[in-house]
Image (cartoon, rainbow, N blue to C red):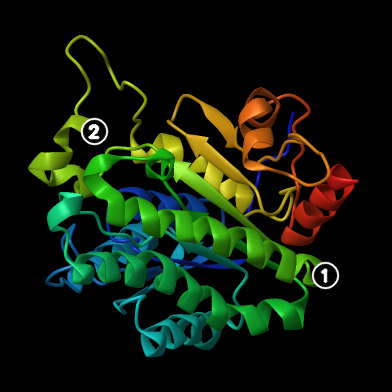
Protein backbone atom coordinates (compact mmCIF):
# COMPACT_ATOMS: atom_id res chain seq x y z
CA UNK A 1 0.00 0.00 0.00
CA UNK A 2 1.30 3.46 -0.90
CA UNK A 3 2.32 5.67 2.00
CA UNK A 4 -0.08 8.51 2.76
CA UNK A 5 1.31 11.96 2.11
CA UNK A 6 1.53 13.74 5.46
CA UNK A 7 2.62 17.15 6.75
CA UNK A 8 3.27 16.24 10.38
CA UNK A 9 5.67 18.72 11.96
CA UNK A 10 5.22 21.24 9.13
CA UNK A 11 3.80 24.73 9.53
CA UNK A 12 1.95 26.41 6.68
CA UNK A 13 0.67 29.90 5.95
CA UNK A 14 -2.29 30.03 3.57
CA UNK A 15 -3.41 33.46 2.42
CA UNK A 16 -7.00 34.15 1.43
CA UNK A 17 -7.92 31.02 3.38
CA UNK A 18 -11.31 32.10 4.68
CA UNK A 19 -13.35 30.84 1.76
CA UNK A 20 -13.40 28.57 -1.31
CA UNK A 21 -9.95 27.53 -2.57
CA UNK A 22 -8.03 29.04 0.34
CA UNK A 23 -10.24 27.32 2.88
CA UNK A 24 -9.82 24.03 1.01
CA UNK A 25 -6.02 24.47 1.01
CA UNK A 26 -6.00 25.07 4.76
CA UNK A 27 -8.39 22.22 5.55
CA UNK A 28 -6.43 19.65 3.53
CA UNK A 29 -3.05 20.63 4.98
CA UNK A 30 -4.46 20.51 8.52
CA UNK A 31 -6.14 17.17 7.83
CA UNK A 32 -2.76 15.79 6.78
CA UNK A 33 -1.03 17.01 9.95
CA UNK A 34 0.20 20.55 9.22
CA UNK A 35 -0.26 23.40 11.63
CA UNK A 36 -1.84 26.25 9.69
CA UNK A 37 -1.92 30.04 9.87
CA UNK A 38 -5.26 30.83 8.26
CA UNK A 39 -5.00 34.30 6.75
CA UNK A 40 -7.97 36.20 5.35
CA UNK A 41 -8.69 39.90 5.27
CA UNK A 42 -12.33 39.08 4.68
CA UNK A 43 -12.87 41.52 1.82
CA UNK A 44 -15.23 41.10 -1.10
CA UNK A 45 -14.25 39.79 -4.55
CA UNK A 46 -13.04 43.30 -5.41
CA UNK A 47 -11.02 43.58 -2.21
CA UNK A 48 -13.35 46.10 -0.60
CA UNK A 49 -14.64 45.83 2.95
CA UNK A 50 -13.50 43.24 5.42
CA UNK A 51 -14.86 40.51 7.67
CA UNK A 52 -12.45 39.26 10.29
CA UNK A 53 -14.74 36.37 11.22
CA UNK A 54 -14.10 34.32 8.08
CA UNK A 55 -10.54 33.32 9.03
CA UNK A 56 -11.61 32.44 12.55
CA UNK A 57 -14.46 30.30 11.21
CA UNK A 58 -11.98 28.15 9.24
CA UNK A 59 -9.76 27.84 12.31
CA UNK A 60 -12.77 26.67 14.31
CA UNK A 61 -13.48 24.02 11.64
CA UNK A 62 -9.90 22.78 11.73
CA UNK A 63 -9.79 22.62 15.51
CA UNK A 64 -13.15 20.83 15.62
CA UNK A 65 -11.65 18.14 13.40
CA UNK A 66 -8.64 17.72 15.66
CA UNK A 67 -6.20 19.94 13.80
CA UNK A 68 -4.16 22.96 14.83
CA UNK A 69 -4.57 26.45 13.37
CA UNK A 70 -4.54 30.13 14.20
CA UNK A 71 -6.28 33.00 12.47
CA UNK A 72 -4.69 36.06 10.90
CA UNK A 73 -6.69 38.88 9.32
CA UNK A 74 -3.91 40.88 7.68
CA UNK A 75 -3.89 42.39 4.20
CA UNK A 76 -1.22 40.66 2.07
CA UNK A 77 -0.52 43.88 0.17
CA UNK A 78 0.81 45.50 3.37
CA UNK A 79 4.33 44.55 4.39
CA UNK A 80 3.63 44.99 8.09
CA UNK A 81 0.69 42.58 7.88
CA UNK A 82 2.86 40.05 6.04
CA UNK A 83 5.39 40.30 8.86
CA UNK A 84 2.62 39.57 11.33
CA UNK A 85 1.55 36.46 9.40
CA UNK A 86 5.00 34.94 9.61
CA UNK A 87 5.31 36.06 13.25
CA UNK A 88 2.06 34.20 13.98
CA UNK A 89 3.62 31.01 12.63
CA UNK A 90 6.87 31.46 14.55
CA UNK A 91 5.23 32.59 17.80
CA UNK A 92 2.65 29.81 17.85
CA UNK A 93 4.52 26.92 16.26
CA UNK A 94 8.22 27.82 16.23
CA UNK A 95 8.79 27.61 12.47
CA UNK A 96 7.34 28.10 9.00
CA UNK A 97 7.77 25.60 6.18
CA UNK A 98 5.09 26.37 3.60
CA UNK A 99 3.54 29.47 2.07
CA UNK A 100 0.54 29.12 -0.22
CA UNK A 101 -0.13 32.50 -1.81
CA UNK A 102 -3.82 32.17 -2.59
CA UNK A 103 -5.25 35.61 -1.72
CA UNK A 104 -6.79 37.27 -4.74
CA UNK A 105 -9.37 39.67 -6.10
CA UNK A 106 -11.12 39.94 -9.43
CA UNK A 107 -13.23 42.52 -11.22
CA UNK A 108 -14.46 42.96 -14.77
CA UNK A 109 -13.43 46.13 -16.56
CA UNK A 110 -13.40 47.28 -20.16
CA UNK A 111 -9.77 48.02 -21.04
CA UNK A 112 -10.52 51.36 -22.71
CA UNK A 113 -12.11 52.73 -19.53
CA UNK A 114 -10.03 50.82 -16.96
CA UNK A 115 -8.55 53.05 -14.29
CA UNK A 116 -4.91 52.93 -13.32
CA UNK A 117 -6.04 52.40 -9.73
CA UNK A 118 -7.84 49.22 -10.81
CA UNK A 119 -4.62 47.86 -12.29
CA UNK A 120 -2.61 48.92 -9.26
CA UNK A 121 -4.97 47.13 -6.88
CA UNK A 122 -4.64 43.88 -8.83
CA UNK A 123 -0.84 44.19 -8.76
CA UNK A 124 -0.89 45.03 -5.04
CA UNK A 125 -2.86 41.94 -4.06
CA UNK A 126 -1.48 39.36 -6.46
CA UNK A 127 2.13 40.37 -7.10
CA UNK A 128 3.00 42.54 -4.10
CA UNK A 129 0.97 40.30 -1.78
CA UNK A 130 2.77 37.14 -2.88
CA UNK A 131 6.10 39.00 -2.73
CA UNK A 132 5.44 40.31 0.78
CA UNK A 133 4.46 37.05 2.45
CA UNK A 134 7.14 34.99 0.70
CA UNK A 135 9.84 37.54 1.50
CA UNK A 136 8.98 37.50 5.20
CA UNK A 137 9.14 33.70 5.30
CA UNK A 138 12.29 33.51 3.17
CA UNK A 139 14.95 34.04 5.92
CA UNK A 140 13.40 31.20 7.91
CA UNK A 141 13.48 28.96 4.85
CA UNK A 142 17.14 29.80 4.27
CA UNK A 143 18.08 29.20 7.92
CA UNK A 144 16.47 25.75 7.94
CA UNK A 145 17.51 25.00 4.32
CA UNK A 146 13.95 24.03 3.52
CA UNK A 147 10.84 25.77 2.24
CA UNK A 148 7.92 25.30 -0.10
CA UNK A 149 6.07 28.13 -1.84
CA UNK A 150 2.99 27.69 -3.99
CA UNK A 151 1.88 30.67 -6.06
CA UNK A 152 -1.57 31.02 -7.58
CA UNK A 153 -1.75 31.93 -11.25
CA UNK A 154 -4.59 31.74 -13.75
CA UNK A 155 -5.51 30.66 -17.26
CA UNK A 156 -6.14 34.39 -17.64
CA UNK A 157 -2.45 34.70 -18.54
CA UNK A 158 -3.31 33.19 -21.92
CA UNK A 159 -5.36 36.32 -22.58
CA UNK A 160 -8.82 37.59 -21.73
CA UNK A 161 -10.37 40.87 -22.81
CA UNK A 162 -12.57 41.24 -19.74
CA UNK A 163 -9.83 41.08 -17.08
CA UNK A 164 -6.72 42.65 -18.57
CA UNK A 165 -5.59 44.00 -15.18
CA UNK A 166 -6.12 40.65 -13.39
CA UNK A 167 -4.40 38.67 -16.13
CA UNK A 168 -1.46 41.08 -16.15
CA UNK A 169 -1.02 40.68 -12.41
CA UNK A 170 -1.14 36.90 -12.65
CA UNK A 171 1.50 37.02 -15.38
CA UNK A 172 3.64 38.99 -12.94
CA UNK A 173 3.28 36.14 -10.46
CA UNK A 174 4.77 33.80 -13.06
CA UNK A 175 7.92 35.93 -13.19
CA UNK A 176 8.02 35.93 -9.39
CA UNK A 177 7.66 32.15 -9.31
CA UNK A 178 10.39 31.47 -11.83
CA UNK A 179 12.87 33.91 -10.31
CA UNK A 180 12.33 32.77 -6.72
CA UNK A 181 12.81 29.19 -7.84
CA UNK A 182 16.27 30.14 -9.05
CA UNK A 183 16.98 32.14 -5.87
CA UNK A 184 15.92 29.26 -3.63
CA UNK A 185 17.54 26.39 -5.49
CA UNK A 186 20.68 26.28 -3.31
CA UNK A 187 18.70 26.60 -0.09
CA UNK A 188 16.29 23.68 -0.35
CA UNK A 189 13.47 26.05 -1.30
CA UNK A 190 11.07 25.04 -4.06
CA UNK A 191 8.68 27.51 -5.65
CA UNK A 192 5.95 26.41 -8.05
CA UNK A 193 2.65 27.79 -9.32
CA UNK A 194 -0.86 26.42 -9.70
CA UNK A 195 -3.58 27.64 -12.05
CA UNK A 196 -6.72 26.34 -10.30
CA UNK A 197 -10.04 26.12 -12.10
CA UNK A 198 -12.63 25.98 -9.34
CA UNK A 199 -15.93 27.58 -8.46
CA UNK A 200 -15.25 30.64 -6.33
CA UNK A 201 -16.94 33.74 -4.99
CA UNK A 202 -14.55 35.72 -7.21
CA UNK A 203 -16.90 34.79 -10.04
CA UNK A 204 -19.91 36.42 -8.37
CA UNK A 205 -19.46 39.52 -10.55
CA UNK A 206 -22.17 39.36 -13.25
CA UNK A 207 -19.57 39.99 -15.91
CA UNK A 208 -17.66 36.87 -14.87
CA UNK A 209 -20.57 34.45 -14.71
CA UNK A 210 -19.85 33.29 -18.24
CA UNK A 211 -16.49 32.04 -16.93
CA UNK A 212 -18.03 30.28 -13.95
CA UNK A 213 -21.36 28.93 -15.19
CA UNK A 214 -21.17 25.64 -17.09
CA UNK A 215 -23.20 25.34 -20.30
CA UNK A 216 -26.53 23.54 -19.98
CA UNK A 217 -26.15 19.79 -19.80
CA UNK A 218 -22.57 19.77 -18.49
CA UNK A 219 -21.48 19.05 -14.94
CA UNK A 220 -18.37 21.14 -14.45
CA UNK A 221 -17.03 22.16 -17.87
CA UNK A 222 -13.48 22.34 -16.63
CA UNK A 223 -14.17 23.97 -13.27
CA UNK A 224 -14.22 21.76 -10.21
CA UNK A 225 -15.12 22.08 -6.56
CA UNK A 226 -12.26 23.60 -4.52
CA UNK A 227 -11.69 20.39 -2.57
CA UNK A 228 -10.97 18.49 -5.80
CA UNK A 229 -8.49 21.07 -7.07
CA UNK A 230 -6.28 21.73 -4.05
CA UNK A 231 -4.50 18.34 -3.82
CA UNK A 232 -2.15 19.63 -6.54
CA UNK A 233 -1.10 22.57 -4.40
CA UNK A 234 -0.65 20.30 -1.39
CA UNK A 235 1.66 18.05 -3.39
CA UNK A 236 3.69 21.05 -4.54
CA UNK A 237 3.92 22.08 -0.88
CA UNK A 238 5.18 18.67 0.24
CA UNK A 239 8.78 17.66 0.85
CA UNK A 240 8.49 15.01 -1.87
CA UNK A 241 7.78 17.54 -4.62
CA UNK A 242 10.49 16.89 -7.24
CA UNK A 243 10.40 20.17 -9.21
CA UNK A 244 10.79 23.91 -8.80
CA UNK A 245 9.96 26.86 -11.03
CA UNK A 246 7.15 24.96 -12.73
CA UNK A 247 3.49 25.72 -13.41
CA UNK A 248 0.52 23.39 -13.30
CA UNK A 249 -3.21 23.53 -13.90
CA UNK A 250 -6.02 21.63 -12.21
CA UNK A 251 -9.73 21.39 -12.88
CA UNK A 252 -10.43 18.77 -10.25
CA UNK A 253 -10.52 15.96 -12.80
CA UNK A 254 -7.40 16.92 -14.75
CA UNK A 255 -3.89 17.99 -13.78
CA UNK A 256 -1.47 19.26 -16.40
CA UNK A 257 1.71 21.25 -16.89
CA UNK A 258 1.88 24.80 -18.22
CA UNK A 259 5.11 25.40 -20.07
CA UNK A 260 7.38 28.30 -20.95
CA UNK A 261 9.43 27.23 -23.94
CA UNK A 262 11.91 28.59 -26.48
CA UNK A 263 12.65 27.56 -30.08
CA UNK A 264 15.80 27.75 -32.21
CA UNK A 265 14.06 29.92 -34.79
CA UNK A 266 16.18 31.24 -37.66
CA UNK A 267 19.85 32.21 -37.55
CA UNK A 268 21.90 34.26 -40.03
CA UNK A 269 24.49 36.99 -40.07
CA UNK A 270 23.30 40.57 -40.61
CA UNK A 271 19.63 40.01 -39.82
CA UNK A 272 17.34 42.18 -41.91
CA UNK A 273 13.67 43.05 -41.99
CA UNK A 274 13.29 41.07 -45.19
CA UNK A 275 15.07 38.06 -43.69
CA UNK A 276 12.51 37.99 -40.90
CA UNK A 277 9.71 38.07 -43.47
CA UNK A 278 11.26 35.41 -45.65
CA UNK A 279 12.04 33.05 -42.75
CA UNK A 280 8.89 33.61 -40.75
CA UNK A 281 7.87 29.95 -41.00
CA UNK A 282 11.06 28.83 -39.26
CA UNK A 283 10.83 31.63 -36.67
CA UNK A 284 7.23 30.77 -35.83
CA UNK A 285 7.65 26.97 -35.84
CA UNK A 286 7.35 25.02 -32.59
CA UNK A 287 9.67 22.13 -33.38
CA UNK A 288 12.72 21.45 -31.21
CA UNK A 289 11.30 23.11 -28.13
CA UNK A 290 13.65 23.87 -25.25
CA UNK A 291 12.60 24.55 -21.68
CA UNK A 292 15.05 26.89 -19.94
CA UNK A 293 14.78 26.87 -16.16
CA UNK A 294 16.24 30.36 -15.73
CA UNK A 295 17.04 33.55 -17.59
CA UNK A 296 20.68 32.47 -17.73
CA UNK A 297 19.72 29.18 -19.40
CA UNK A 298 17.48 31.07 -21.85
CA UNK A 299 20.32 33.44 -22.76
CA UNK A 300 22.76 30.54 -23.12
CA UNK A 301 20.36 28.86 -25.53
CA UNK A 302 20.03 32.02 -27.58
CA UNK A 303 23.82 32.33 -27.75
CA UNK A 304 24.08 28.69 -28.84
CA UNK A 305 21.41 29.12 -31.51
CA UNK A 306 23.05 32.34 -32.70
CA UNK A 307 26.33 30.67 -33.58
The answer to whether mark 1 and mark 2 are in CB contact below 8 A is: no
- Please, is residue 78 above or below residue 209 in the view? below
Neighbor class of circle 1 (other Cα within 10 Å; few <14, some 14-19, many 20+) is few
Q: Quadrant of the N terminus?
A: top right
Q: Nearer the viewer, residue 147 or 89?
A: 147
Q: Secondary structure at mark 2?
A: helix
Of all residues, the one furthest to the top in this rendering is 217
Task: Evaluate whether residue 8 shows in this view.
Answer: no
Neighbor class of circle 2 (other Cα within 10 Å; few <14, some 14-19, many 20+) is few
Q: Nearer the viewer, residue 80 or 84?
A: 80
Which residue is found at the position 37% from the left and 25% from the top?
Answer: 222
- Please, is residue 199 above or below residue 213 in the view? below
Quadrant hosting residue 245: bottom right
Q: Secondary structure at mark 1?
A: helix
Measured in 3D between alpha carbons, the distance from the residue under mark 1 to the one under mark 2, in whole angstroms, is: 40 Å
Task: Identify the residue position indicated by label 2 in the image.
Answer: 211
Which residue is found at the position 73% from the left and 39% from the top?
Answer: 3
Which residue is found at the position 53% from the left and 55% from the top?
Answer: 174
Task: Evaluate whether residue 291 shows in this view.
Answer: yes
Measured as percent of width and height from the top left, residue 204 is found at 14, 45
Task: Identify the residue position indicated by label 1 in the image.
Answer: 186
Q: Nearer the viewer, residue 103 or 264?
A: 264
Amino acid sequence: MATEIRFDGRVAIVTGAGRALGRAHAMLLAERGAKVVVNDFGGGPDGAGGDTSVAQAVVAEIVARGGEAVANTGDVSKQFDAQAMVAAAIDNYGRVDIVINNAGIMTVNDFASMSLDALRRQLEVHVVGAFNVTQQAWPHFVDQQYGRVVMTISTGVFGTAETVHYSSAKAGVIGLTRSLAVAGKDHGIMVNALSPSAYSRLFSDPGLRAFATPPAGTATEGRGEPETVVPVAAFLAHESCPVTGEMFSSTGTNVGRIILAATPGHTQENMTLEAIRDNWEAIYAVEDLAFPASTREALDLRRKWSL
